[in-house]
Image (cartoon, rainbow, N blue to C red):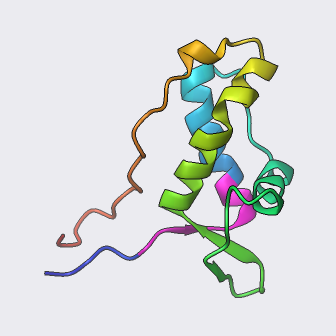
Amino acid sequence: MATEPIRRYTTAEAAAQATHWRRLLSAGAATVTSDAIRQWRRRGHLAPTGLDDRGHPTYQHEDLARAERTTRGRALRLVGIPETTSAPAPLIRPPTTQGHPT
């Protein structure tokens, strides 16, 4: 049984993925920038799990989902969405590549 490779994101890719999740909850109102990803790292919400071929940090899917969920309440309040509507969602699984056995 083959295992799926661990999905890792660069800072820009992490921002795009977290923005996708936030927009699902905020009707498109909330975004996550690369600067926000770097802030999450500095504040201890997100730790890099490796480096890309240019030496830039990469982040695992599950860690990114956890950091997004941890910071979600404040972010949604900043765009006018009450925190009570942003109940924690389950961790979102990384996309799988079709054709690979699981």
Q: Residue at x 77, y 86 (%)?
A: 55
Specify whether residue 79 is painted magenta.
Answer: no
Can see residue 1?
yes
Q: Is residue 6 above or below residue 95?
A: below
Horizontal side, residue 57 vs residue 6: left or right: right
Q: Quadrant of the C terminus?
A: bottom left
As drawn, is 84 to the left or to the right of 46? left
What is the x, y in percent for residue 13? Answer: 66, 58
Judging depth in this view, the residue of 42 and 54 nearest the camera is 42
> Closer to the camera, 41 or 21?
41
Residue 1 quadrant:
bottom left
Query: Taking 6 as reference, is 71 above or below it?
Result: above
Residue plotted at (66% across, 28% down): 73
Instruction: Estimate the x, y position of residue 72 in percent, counting from the top left.
Output: 65, 33
Residue reaching furthest to the left: 1
Residue 3 versus residue 94 in the image, above or below: below
The reply to whether residue 30 is in sight is no
| Span colored in magenta | 6-14
> Residue 100: x and y, percent?
23, 72
Is residue 61 shown left or right of residue 19?
A: left
What residue appears at the point 62 percent right and 28 percent down from the top-left corner?
23
Residue 97 picture location, percent across and down: 33, 64
* Residue at the spot 76% in from the left edge and 54% down from the top edge: 40
